[in-house]
Amino acid sequence: VLSALAVSRETNIRFTWFIDAKSWHHQRETLKLLREQGQSIQFHCYYHMTYKSRRLNRINISKGLSILKSNGLYPEAMVSPNGFYYPGYASAIKKFDFRYTSEFGYDVDNLPSWPGNDRSQPLQLPVHPGSFGVFFQADFSEEDAFLHLHKTMGKRVDDDGLIILYEHPFFFNGRSRQWSDFIMQCFRKGYQY
């Protein structure tokens, strides 16, 4: 977390943190630090699971939101664990009035949209599904991973004018300089935050 926050400060951009409530439940000081630094804190889950059942998704979401609210956090967005997008999940999230969500199982590398053009659903913000965890499983070197992100970003920006990347905070550890350089190179290319 501290490495990601260092990159945020150095590049003067704010990250959005999707909180796994069960894992973060006892990290009140870290949550306080995120708030103090103007980071956007949103919701991920309680159990790191996405269910086919609407009822089980609602229970999981309700439990996690209860913990965040007890810490003074009122998220307006959510991403599902592992990016799954089942009909039961889609039905469950509708109840909670999230402004936006992002699930790989719905869409990737595309423009924002409402599922089925139904504006009662949260707006879907498709992200690029590559992260260092995925890259390392695919035997990418660190250099190859950043090269992939640069190429993908260039293509998406050229095609649509928009790309949203994601990463897990622990993959910033030992890579703060590389992430800061990557972001600054994007700014120098004229990409805006």
Image (cartoon, rainbow, N blue to C red):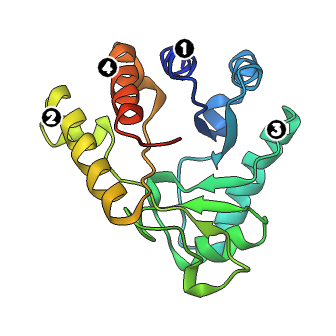
- Nearer the observer, disc 1 or disc 2? 2
Q: Picture coordinates of residue 11 (x, y %)?
A: 50, 22
Earlier residue among tags 1 and 2:
1
Q: Is residue 139 left or right of residue 77?
A: left
Question: What residue does disc 1 label?
Answer: 2
Question: Callout 3, which amino acid?
Answer: Leu
Mark 2 element type: helix
Question: Callout 4, which amino acid?
Answer: Gln
State the separation of the CA atoms marked 4 and 2: 12 Å
Question: What residue does disc 2 label?
Answer: 144
Mark 1 element type: helix
- Nearer the observer, disc 3 or disc 2? 2
State the separation of the CA atoms marked 1 and 3: 20 Å
**How packed is label 2: few (under 14 Cα within 10 Å), some, or many (20 or more)?**
few
Mark 4 element type: helix
Asked whether the beta carbons under mark 4 and mark 3 sit within 8 Å of each other, the answer is no
